Amino acid sequence: MTLPEPGPSPAHALATPAPEPPAWLARETAYMSYVADVCSTPQGRRDLRDGLNLRRLDESWRMMRHLRPRIPNWGPDATVAHLAVAGLYAHQAANPTTDHAVPTVYDAAHGNVGWSLERAVHHSVLREDSTADLLERVARQRRLKPALALLHRPVIRMTAAGIPVSWPRLLRDLNSWPKYRLKIADAWMQSYYSPEPTHPANTTEELSA
């Protein structure tokens, strides 16, 4: 008697392909997928957490052993943006020795930083008055590092509380910050103060990298 071919396992049957990012966000999503892969080992996650110390980004040798080939030669600000976002991601990455789930770094439903901040306030993770002040202070920063310094702690608090952060969008916005600061800040404020409609507002998809 011929036995029927075995069907897919329940886990395989329920598996769905990772969502495809739009073309304007593909490079940042690929980079963050690589960062997530590095964080899938305990040593890799420890090395990338060096990026949490903004003062050490200029001498981030442990991070560079993993990330240097993936960081474009767009100048010092781009390097800082890539390292800082990798460090923030590594801080919230699951412990690879106990959690073997494959992380999703892109979700079309997740918007820009303003979108995340609005949800943090809604869920009482951040205070409304201080968050509004934060957005204004960040918008005034003409250089990337001071803007990063202001965003650092709120992003850590949000991710620790389970508030979604779109890492590819954050990376793209920080890469574009020195040149397109006002447009990016305006898009963040639009998402924060006017969270409707449901689909998050885009920021820099039409801006040159």
Image: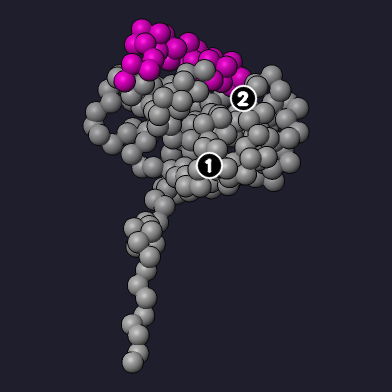
Residue at 48% over, 35% down: 167
On the image, which quarter does residue 59 sit in?
A: top right
Q: Does the magenta stretch include residue 193?
A: no
Q: Quadrant of the N terminus?
A: bottom left
Q: Is residue 72 visible?
A: no
Main SS of the magenta part reads helix
Residue at 38% over, 17% down: 125
Q: Does the magenta stretch include residue 146?
A: yes
The residue that label 2 is drawn on is 52
The residue that label 1 is drawn on is 98
Residue at 41% over, 52% down: 18
Q: How far apart are marks 2 and 1 (CA)?
A: 22 Å
Q: What range is drawn magenta here?
A: 123-152
Q: Which amino acid does label 1 sit on?
A: Thr
Q: What residue type is labelled 2?
A: Leu
Residue 116, above or below 105:
above
On the image, which quarter does residue 132 sit in?
A: top left
User: Crowding near pointer 1: few (<14 within 10 Å), some, many (20+)?
Assistant: few
